[in-house]
Amino acid sequence: MAQGFATVKAVPTGDTLVLMGRAAKGPPPELQLSLSGVQAPRLARGPNASAPEEPFAWEARNFLRKLALGKTVQFRQEQNSKGGRAYGSIFLPSATPGGPPESVAVACVRAGWCVASSSSSPGGGQDDDQLAAAEADAKEARRGVHVDAAAKQKAVREVKFNAEAAPYADKYRGQSVKALIEYVKDGSNMRCMLLPDFAVINVSLAGVRCGRVNKTQATTPAPPGAPAAAGATKDASASSSNT
């Protein structure tokens, strides 16, 4: 199984991270790794998703983004589920000089944004005692998801997927707007979630145009420089996502 050091490139959910290694020849290697032994609330995946968003899914993801995005971490891939999902452990450098690395899974459970899953689930069992202690502490303090039903009901977002951009352009014309870049199509086009509207719109950078990066280049190769431009935009968006 893979292990080593990598940079956290993206955080798709409250318990899953995309890790990026160093480039040798060609694009840098990437690994999507779910944290062993924990589970975060599920995010809505789109307007036609089979399951609704669970309470505090956004807060759980946002906590993990602020904790780890753009940082160098130590990781260990431990096993895969039957569906091919990779599970493992991820550690941040110690906050105190000479101290032990910090388990990202334990940090998420202690903050109340993940719960410890059964050791029989894929990837579980390595840090059961630490996870159980962290969860007990979060429950006692009523942190994160450990609140009453009324509070959980208020913690579900209403996401406007595939929103029309024009109304928001009129609403925020001439203003700076906070947004989360959800997907980079190429060097000058991306999908953004406007905050606090939770509206997902397509955004094109003004005054520039980059070659399109095809999802499959079997028939139509991307123009020269297009993958590099898309990579640069992804790197820039990742480095500024904690602000």
Image: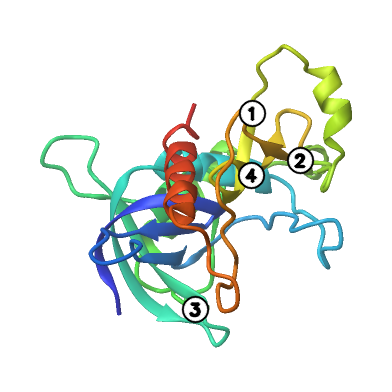
The image quadrant of residue 178 is: top right
Q: Residue at x 46, y 32 (%)?
A: 240
Badge 3: residue crowd in 10 Å (few <14, some 14–19, many ≥20)? many
Residue wearing tag 4: 190
Q: Position of residue 90 (x, y in %)?
A: 34, 58
- Give amino acid for label 2: Ile
**Sequence-earlier tag: 2 or 4:** 4
Residue wearing tag 3: 122
**Sequence-earlier tag: 2 or 3:** 3
Count of numbered tags: 4
Q: Position of residue 224 (x, y in %)?
A: 45, 57
**Sequence-earlier tag: 3 or 1:** 3
Q: Residue at x 40, y 80 (%)?
A: 79
Residue wearing tag 1: 206
Please give left or right for residue 131 compared with residue 121 in the image.
Answer: left
Q: What SS does tag 3 mark? A: loop
- Towards the viewer: 76 or 26: 26
- Towards the viewer: 1 or 171: 171
Give the Cα distance between marks 2 and 4: 9 Å
Q: Residue at x 42, y 51 (%)?
A: 228
**Sequence-earlier tag: 2 or 1:** 2
Q: What SS does tag 1 mark? A: loop
Please give left or right for residue 45 compared with residue 213 in the image.
Answer: right
The image quadrant of residue 201 is: top right
Q: Residue furthest bottom?
A: 82
Residue wearing tag 2: 201
